[in-house]
Amino acid sequence: MLIPSPKWLRGDDIAASEITPRHVFESRRRLMMMAAAGAAGATLSPWFMRRAHAAQAHGAKLAAKLNQAYAISEKPTPYDDVTTYNNFYEFGTDKSDPARYAGTLRTRPWQVSVEGLVKQPKVYDIDELLKLAPLEERVYRMRCVEGWSMVIPWIGYSLSELIKRVEPQPGAKFVQFITLADKKQMPGIGSPVLDWPYSEGLRMDEAMHPLALLTFGLYGEVLPNQNGAPVRMVLPWKYGFKSAKSIVKIRFVDKQPPTSWNLAAANEYGFYSNVNPDVDHPRWSQATERRIGEDKGSGGFAALFAPKRKTLPFNGYGQQVASLYAGMDLKKNF
């Protein structure tokens, strides 16, 4: 009988690549417990199988100091849910598709072209863009138009830091974000669900607001591919689809730019898309939401059974951003 040595017990001779990440272990344990209890039933077994294969390894560390001005007391959504339950249609329309398929995305080399009505147009290498301003960690509420929400510790800096450096011309009234559209890397690009590439936009004063975060990481790590690596926008007072992922172009323009979901269904997705519980989506109410991770389930299971909570105007950021829309009819300009 072999007696393990103290070194073996400590795990000193185990390669780091062979150690199961804690969040993966915990995810699998939850799945096994729920399956054993028959919590979901046979009809949910396909989801369980997707979930079991979707757990993602953690990425490289990304150091950033927490900005207390953007810290909230609400409990952050578990990393595993944030990285395995989200929309990124370039990789498929199912919430688990991004985690399953985004491994094909190549985030190095990567460039972001800043162009249009600016005095200092420039093509930034991603590492240059990453170091343009000090990185901060900010804990933001995020609300999806479909009725679920999360609390996520993002890492980045205010988009205004970039805007000030490129010096917009007086005629620049809007900022447009164009994302990567590469069929070789993104299997969802073959779908006609949207016109590609994905396009989003902000009014200039929205883009300059301190809450508008040019984002490179979450939970102390670089962005996972499925969450919009290597750079995306995060706009916590707007519905999630406004926060463009995997950005390759930032354009400064004089007219309101076309945006992908507004083009696809203008009666459902307005240009502004501020979180407004008083304006229902044509197919569901926006008055309440379900916070992912608040029940004993996870991912899609949690979205079905998490308790409902009231949706806050501007997702709880009204004190900071309501003045941007003073005098506007927010039911008409939804």
Image (cartoon, helix red, strand yellow):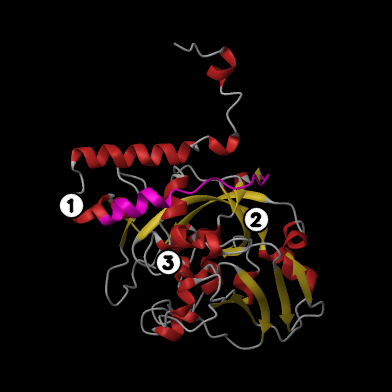
Q: Earlier in the sequence, mark 2 or mark 1?
A: 1
Q: Is residue 286 above or below residue 265?
A: above
Mark 2 in CB contact with mark 1 (< 8 angstroms): no
Query: Residue sitting at 48 percent across and 84 percent down?
Result: 195
SS category of the residue bearing label 1? helix
Q: What residue does disc 2 label?
A: 156
Q: Which mark is residue 42?
A: 1
Q: Disc 3 versus disc 2: distance between alpha carbons?
A: 22 Å
Q: Disc 2 versus disc 1: distance between alpha carbons?
A: 42 Å
Q: Disc 1 versus disc 3: distance between alpha carbons?
A: 36 Å
Tell me which amino acid carries mark 1.
Ala
Q: Earlier in the sequence, mark 3 or mark 2?
A: 2
Q: Is residue 327 above or below residue 107?
A: below
Give the residues drawn in magenta, as a range.
46-64
Residue 56 on the magenta segment:
yes
Q: How many marks?
A: 3
User: In the picture, residue 332 is in which quadrant?
Assistant: bottom left
Q: What residue does disc 3 label?
A: 275
Horizontal and vertical percent position of residue 229: 59, 61
Q: Earlier in the sequence, mark 1 or mark 3?
A: 1
User: In the picture, residue 97 is in which quadrant?
Assistant: bottom left
SS category of the residue bearing label 2? strand
